[in-house]
Image (spheres, coloured by chain):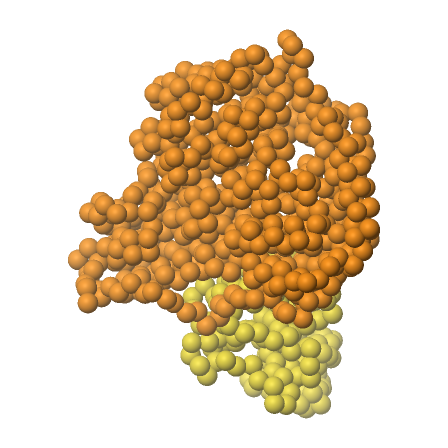
Amino acid sequence: MELLSGADMIARFLQDEGVEYIYGYPGGAALHIYDALFRQDKVKHILVRHEQAATHAADGYARASGKPGTVLVTSGPGATNAVTGIATAYMDSIPMVVLCGQVMSHLIGDDAFQETDIIGVTRPIVKHSFSIRHPSEIPEVLKKAYYLASTGRPGPVVVDIPKDMTTPTERHEYVYPKKVKLRSYNPVARGHTGQIKKAVELMLKARRPVFYTGGGVVTGRACEGLTDLVKRLGHPITTTLMGIGAFPQSDDQCLGWLGMHGSYESNMAMHHADLIIAIGARFDDRVTNNTSKFCPTAKIIHVDIDPSSVSKTVRADVPIVGPAQSVINEMISLLQGREIADPEALNEWWQTIEGWREERRGKLYEPSKPGEPIKPQEVIEAVCRQTRGEAYVTTDVGQHQMFAAQYYKFDKPNRFITSGGLGTMGFGFPAAMGIKQNFPDEQVVCVTGEGSFQMMMQELSTCKQFGGGVKIINLNNASLGMVRQWQDLNYKSRHAHSYMESLPNFQQLIESYGFTALRVETMEELEPALEKTFADKHELVFLDVMVDPHEHVYPMQVPLGSMRDMLLSKTERS
Amino acid sequence: MRHIISILMENEPGALSRVVGLFSQRNFNIETLNVAPTEDETLSRLTVTTVGDDRVIEQITKHLNKLIDVVKLVDLTEGSHIERELMLVKVKALGAARDEVKRTVDIFRAQIVDVTPSLYTVQITGDADKLDAFLQAMAPVGIHEVARTGVSGIARGDKVLSL
């Protein structure tokens, strides 16, 4: 038996839990915990420059590794600054534990200095939260927090820790709890066999099937199984933005991703399908467009670990509640020795799909002519070539995010790291930093824009202190591109506050931190600059690329339309 | 359609706010709410009446079940059940109306639990319709104050909501 203070228990627990990095920022209510961290060297603490960055960095790590990220912040403003990052993780079901300092128990409710009811503030954006009421609870509560964050449908868990729970002189027994049980929390271990059988029969009989898979396949570590299943059936597959890379994009069976800016063939295939096999996807409004016109001729199989996701926006004909991995494995074993009922029909379906592919081939965007500004799409394609499609790519939010998703080709899961659900500008750079620090030998690229980058650029300082050799590709169009695009389309090009006046000189800014910055204006300069950018894996390089500010992201679904209603360019419509 | 959902949840601080917060967060509707500890001191029983079509009710029960503090729940309206609400009403009781109020109280099998020269305080239990009917009957006399507990309920027969 070991007697430890609450603060030491936290430090010790993090070690025993195998946490390597935590991201945080100290402050009054968290000082005992910081002192305990100072007196050990197993858990490394990265001092961010804003708490929002701590959550995004931990989140980026969690997305890349599949393990929960850890954040430590102080009470009041420390905790409220973390809120956007918690909401980001919540919307994308990312495992994360956020430890928040809190004022002394006897001061709670008195509007004490730096007091915020962070449990209340974060209630709608956490999977669960805990408030420590006695130091002896700490090991068990923390274990529960990690258990909840990383099992079932993952999500962020907040632990509120009043300062007097960590008093150095007050010691209690510490035992690392190997297991915890919550009587009200039992995530399903497998799907209903009868329903899975029904689904497999439909999959064999389908004439125009499409797999539509999401982030649940990635977080559920079911990508290999999915690839096997889709290969066996020979069906086409489209993924959500969150599901990119779950099935190799270079494979012909992959139609790309779907939805508002998804590929033409994905959206067309969805609309005309007679069977949609949705796995770990949640029929989000950016995917379905108008639900009343969504896939009018399709039966829907919906596999999800979260029962509340099933039939939430679109009714499932065959609902299956269960983890993607075990359901997919069961499907595969049921397929043994079985054949597709009508290979001729599937063949015809593929011909139709190939027709759609052919329609758009070479027309996705118009490359720049000599002397014209670089097109943002060209930059992404060049980055993809330069990194052989193997980098971790984080993005912020807007046009550059869509271009990165469209023109970088991912063959592996956990590589495209983006704020899909919440759409958080400022996510990309700290997320990239979190990934790089945990995977120092990998190329980590942050595709961003000058609007998003300025939301979290203070983290350059963190990279200077702790290392973080990320490559920042700034698609600089001197405007908030996606806002501008909507203003072009819906507001007669009245660009209300979408123009970024008085941008900093990024080169000087980056160099003031001691990093390399390159600026590119023409296509001829692009490839050599990219070579320099990626030459040293461990060096942070900022590549400022001046791109055509008039470019729009296409395809773009027409609001309130069906999946197939798309703008294909400034002049074409589906 | 109106549904009565009874929930067994952890008797922990914050549990109630998670349940109530869920309703406002997801734009679900709460008509009445009633909560108290059970014979097992670690559990509270919360009963909520809500209105929605089948899709909405399905979402409500699924989201409630997802809350870590919710241990078990039942939609009582799915089966035969007993529902009760208690109401305390202060009504004007002056002159001829004083006798009239007393008679109406008897008709409704209610009780007068407090008396002043000008007021009766009436206690009445029953389902929501009965309480509404009593208020309607008292309206012409003059209602001064109403306190209702919200609906509580239990399934008929052998079915029990317990761990």
Q: Nearer the viewer, residue B97 or A359?
A: A359
Q: Is residue A221 above or below residue A491?
A: below
Would residue B106 be found to the left or right of residue A167 on screen? right
**So how many labels did they put on this image?**
0
Where, quadrant-wise, is the C terminus of chain A in this rendering?
Answer: top right
What residue is at 55 percent from the left and 51 percent from the top?
A224
Q: Where residue A422 sits: x, y (%)?
A: 56, 43
Q: Which chain is orange?
A: A
Looking at the image, which residue sits at the far left? A169
Front-most of A264 and A14?
A264
Q: In front here: B76 or A176?
A: A176
Residue beneath the point at 53% across and 66% down: A189
Residue A433 position within the rendered picture, expressed as x and y whole percent measured from the top left? 41, 35
Left or right relative to A543: residue A485:
right
Q: Residue, x 28% and y 47% (percent of image)?
A: A43
Determine if residue B84 is in view. Answer: no
Chain identity for the colour yellow used in the image? B
Q: Tell me the quarter of the picture where residue A50 sits.
A: top left
Left or right, A530 with reference to A33: right
Residue visible at 20% across and 60% down in the picture:
A4
Is residue B8 visible to us here? yes
A542 over A31 or under it: above or below:
above
Which residue appears farthest toward the top when viewing the image? A371
Please say if B41 is above or below A513: below
Whole-percent x, y for residue B155 in the image: 63, 84
Residue A476 lies in quadrant: top right
Q: Residue furthest front?
A: A337
**In the picture, which quadrant includes the N terminus of chain A?**
bottom left
Left or right: A14, with A171 as reference point: right
**Residue A430 lies in quadrant:** top left
- Residue A336 location in percent, x, y? 65, 62
